[in-house]
Amino acid sequence: MNLKDEFIKYFVSKGHVQIPSAPLIPENDPSVLFNTAGMQPLIPYLMGKEHPLGKRLCDYQKCVRLTDLDSIGDKTHHTFFEMLGNWSLGDYFKEESIAYSFEFLTKVLKLPVNKLAVTVFKGDGDIPKDVVSESVWKSLGIPSERIAYLGVEDNFWIAGDTGPCGGDTEIFYFRSDDEVPKVFDPKDERWVEIWNNVFMEFNKDSEGKITELPQKNVDTGMGLERVVAVLEGKTDNYETSIWKEIIEVIEKISGKAYKGNEESMRIIADHVRTAVFISADYAGIKPSNTDQGYILRRLIRRAIRHAKKLDIDTNSDFLEQIALEVIKKYENYYDEIKNNKDIVLEVLRNENIKFNRTLSKGLKEFEKLVKHIDGNMIDKDNAFKLYDTYGFPIELTEELAREKGLMVDTLGFKEKFKAHQELSRTASAGKFKGGLASTGEKETKYHTATHLLNAALKRVVGRDVHQKGSNITEERMRFDFSCDHKLTDQEKRKVEDLVNEWILDDLEVNVETLPKKEAIESGAEAMFIDKYGDIVTVYTIGDVSREVCGGPHVKTTGELGHFKIIKEEASSAGVRRIKAILE
Ligand code: SER
């Protein structure tokens, strides 16, 4: 049984629409480096914006959580993981949500009820105890001894500090061959959380004030890796079918067995898988010293260091061999993995070459340092030297130090590092300016206006005009398109007039969800088709435009106001750029 497919099938049968996994590198949210939860891309819709595909959604979402990086190496943690989720956007609430989860777990996955337990929010301040969830669980056959009431730390969910949030009920499974204890103890590690149903009815603002959202939502998240382990009766996630072949490749390359070398093998497997997904993302992340690039670099370098621990010849294509196994597993689910295979392999190859030049020398330097150390602290100058001369991310130095029972003056290192980093930080500040920067009302209007502009250019300048890029802020839109000449004043005016005519016509903006192939066959403009998953959304504006696009868009073009081109200039060879505003 394939859990991802079963999950989607079940929720589609309950009236949900499958939405594609959002990219791992968030497109619209510069406040986080990676998508950390399935709900992240849905925040505007949880806050009340109407989702074009309806009120019931489901998906499998790529996630990366950095909070667990230090725990990688144990049986259950992963940096990259997939989260299965279903949502109600102001549609059903606690009762159906719990009933669906229960039916899926016990009827579809056939997990025994006797091995399930749940936690329920006990309330806090003005927010009362969740007696509804309790009674639903009881009615489904979960006895009182298997229901624990917990407070905000455990049963109130929010992504970060602000945004949509609410109490939750978490489902646990007894993952052990021991006899199931009668009474559920959430602290007993044999009980593992497998599913979290969050009842998002509040919003927390930056002052910490909690107010009710315009609608009551459900946001659920089920960790794929954990549930597969449960289904396959494993207590070590890395022994499941998800990791089996990847670990086997590492065993083969190292000539060592998994047993006895678990920690390093798990770290290598986890970090290579994560590095594959980060470097395959269409954001085009490369190893660097800032932001996502730095995480990518850290992961690859840590994997290389652990490969060395296993006596793998790191001066080989071992990373690529492992990556190929990862790619094989995921390419049918995520097309960036298929399309960017060569890029991924190149990233790994190049970073390995870079780090290999200095790794052995750096490790020797580290040993020397340890021998002559005064006290138990690696000082900031040495930490910086390991970074600057030998390419050791500070976290790698910390890990090496930990293994020797030493500490690192990380704070001192960071100060020293700051001056060094200032430059690259300035450079990366502009990084999130690509594409749709946020999804406010104004940006949404500009987003729709790009479709109209695209259509108008095709009519006025020629059918072979294609979009090459766009960038939207609250103040203006920028649109790059293929064109071999400077637009004449007449062309510009015609384009403006046409867009404004369509705005006055108050054309309807409609959305459909289609398999990618059908979308293309239906004639939808699909310039960035590789960016999307197998199922895409197609926006049609009256009979003037039809484009594959992630949205969001206004409902009718009448909302846009007056369109005006403020600049037309060259962008690069064969590409022109228009800046325009809506007044
Ligand atoms: N947002 C919740 C979580 O990540 C449920 O999806 O656990």
Image: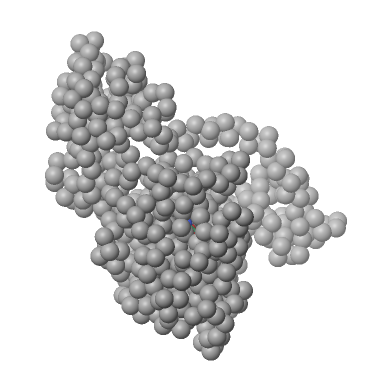
Towards the viewer: 380 or 443:
443
Let me know if residue 34 appears in the view: no
Residue 177's x, y, as percent?
Answer: 51, 87
Residue 383's x, y, as percent?
Answer: 72, 49
Q: Residue at x 38, y 29 (%)?
A: 442
Towards the viewer: 390 or 281:
281
Which colouring convention does the figure follow? one colour
Toward the top, the furthest residue is 489
Q: How many marks?
A: 0
Q: Residue at x 63, y 33 (%)?
A: 422
Q: Residue at x 29, y 28 (%)?
A: 559
Q: Is residue 407 left or right of residue 277?
A: right
Q: Is residue 289 left or right of residue 399?
A: left
Towards the viewer: 9 or 118:
118
**Residue 539, above or below 133:** above
Residue 408's x, y, as percent?
Answer: 75, 54
Name the quarter where the N terminus is drawn: bottom left
Towards the viewer: 493 or 529:
493
Residue 294's x, y, as percent?
Answer: 55, 47
Q: Quadrant of residue 565?
A: top left
Name the quarter where the C terminus is drawn: top left
Toward the right, the furthest residue is 374
**Residue 324, above or below 455:** below
Let me know if residue 549 appears in the view: yes
**Residue 178, above or below 426:** below
